[in-house]
Amino acid sequence: MTSENPTAVEGRLVVVGGGTAGAEVAFASRSAGWTGEIIVLSEEAYAPYHRPPLSKDLLKMDAVFADPDPLKGASLYAKKNVDLRLGSRVDGIDATARTLSMNANQSLSYDRLVLAVGGRARELPLIARLETRPSNVHELRTLDDCVRLRSCFQSGRVLMIVGAGYIGLEVAAAAVKAGQRVILLEAATRVLARVTAPVVSQFFEREHAKRGVEILTSTTIESLSFGTDGGVDRVVTSDGSEYHVDNLVVGVGLEPNIELANDAGLEIGNGIVVDDSMTTSDPNILALGDCADFHSGFYDRRVRIESVANAVEHARRAAITLTGGDPKPWQVPWFWSNQYEHSLKIVGLSTGYDETRVIDDSEGTSFAVEYLRDGRLIAVDAINHAAAFQSGKRRIVETIHA
Ligand SMILES: Cc1cc2nc3c(=O)[nH]c(=O)nc-3n(C[C@H](O)[C@H](O)[C@H](O)COP(=O)(O)OP(=O)(O)OC[C@H]3O[C@@H](n4cnc5c(N)ncnc54)[C@H](O)[C@@H]3O)c2cc1C
């Protein structure tokens, strides 16, 4: 119980999903005054862990691979009386009876339910149509995906990556370091086209090309052929070129897991629709993190954001909703990516910008891009430039709240 929430909240809080948002909401709710049961159901075999290292340190050949980097220390679950149930896949919700079903034949009732179910890697239609998924086609969302992909890294092998977003680029950096030939396919005219200005794309294209990554922009897969083991063996690209591949990584974005919510009759938009308090169209059910379509109080529009900072903010906001306190003002969204020795930090959402300003240094390896709309600063990409990130963050907050 806290001074903000003098009334203890009894009842059973069930959280579906043991990722960043799920783990955070369980502990934040306990701290905020939920004194009843808190149960976290996770389909994964591991206690909640950090996902960003999956495409960074954990994928590098020299990383010592032991346990995943846990989000909360193992002893904390017992100490805070958070009942974490691994291997528990929820397959249905009866919102009227306030029960859910899991692992095909178990049932559990709830007083309040939190959906923190994240998303899954988007499939290429060409792969989705196949009867069996080839064993050398990879995605990267879970620790198991990371272990499987890493076990395929071997000097001299050919890795084709489809999609030059953050995950595709981070995998390329780790794979080329492991001595593989890396071919990176991107349908748009430049890498990171959806999220950054051309100058940032050019910087990362140069850095990858310098290490030998072959970047093919405006290029897609035309057809695949298979070896005797059923794995993808050759890829023909849209420009008619043909490549032998040993492994294929698909990094073309995320599909939010909306099916449980949809089947339960909740409102769906670009994710599970929630209001400012993270509550869905059912007052007893909240949704958070990558799966939530929410109204950003910061930018005053509906968005769905895939980032750690967003998942944590949603979880803390939800904990306040569940225990009856006053929500804090919305924070400016931020994100990071590491490729080779370079750090990219992004603050704000640049969508809809009409002007950019580059803040450069003389060597061109440490610079920032400021994104403006109607003359107002809305986002900053800082490349090896911590000061520009910090100052950008402060100025975006001042501008938006002016
Ligand atoms: C490889 C990789 C690198 C990333 N790098 C960065 C980064 O550098 N910076 C950054 O800010 N963000 C990064 N992200 C994004 C960030 O990790 C996510 O935004 C964040 O994990 C979202 O948390 P979440 O709890 O909403 O979803 P998730 O972390 O995806 O957790 C959802 C959990 O719910 C479980 N689940 C789903 N359905 C069910 C069900 N029916 N029953 C039981 N359990 C279920 C899933 O198995 C999963 O464990 C990265 C993501 C990946 C995959």
Image (cartoon, rainbow, N blue to C red):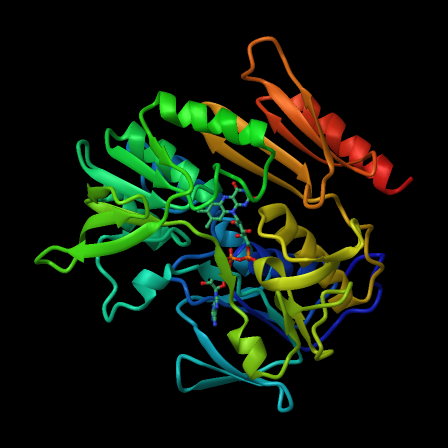
- 226 over 177 or under it: above or below: below
User: Where does the C terminus fall, quadrant-wise?
Assistant: top right
Residue at screen point 45% across, 57% down: 47
Image position, residue 235 (x, y; %): 23, 49
Q: Residue 359 is drawn in which quadrant?
A: top right
Kindly give the residue lying farthest to the top in the view shown.
362
Image position, residue 231 (x, y; %): 17, 56
- 37 over 80 or under it: above or below: below
- 348 over 221 or under it: above or below: above
Kindly give the residue lying farthest to the front in the view shown.
240
User: Where does the N terminus fall, quadrant-wise?
Assistant: bottom right
Q: Residue 198 is drawn in which quadrant?
A: top right
Image position, residue 322 (x, y; %): 74, 68
Along the horizontal axis of the image, is 194 left or right of 85? right
Residue at screen point 83% across, 34% down: 375
Residue at screen point 38% across, 44% down: 219
Kindly give the residue lying farthest to the right in the view shown.
402
Which residue is at the front of the view, 241 or 170? 241
Along the horizontal axis of the image, is 132 left or right of 377? left
Residue at screen point 47% across, 66% down: 42
- 389 over 322 or under it: above or below: above
Kindly give the residue lying farthest to the left in the view shown.
228
Which residue is at the front of the view, 272 or 313? 272
Q: Residue 302 is drawn in which quadrant?
A: bottom right
Along the horizontal axis of the image, is 342 left or right of 124? right
Along the horizontal axis of the image, is 37 left or right of 178? right
Image position, residue 87 (x, y; %): 39, 69
Total count of labels? 0
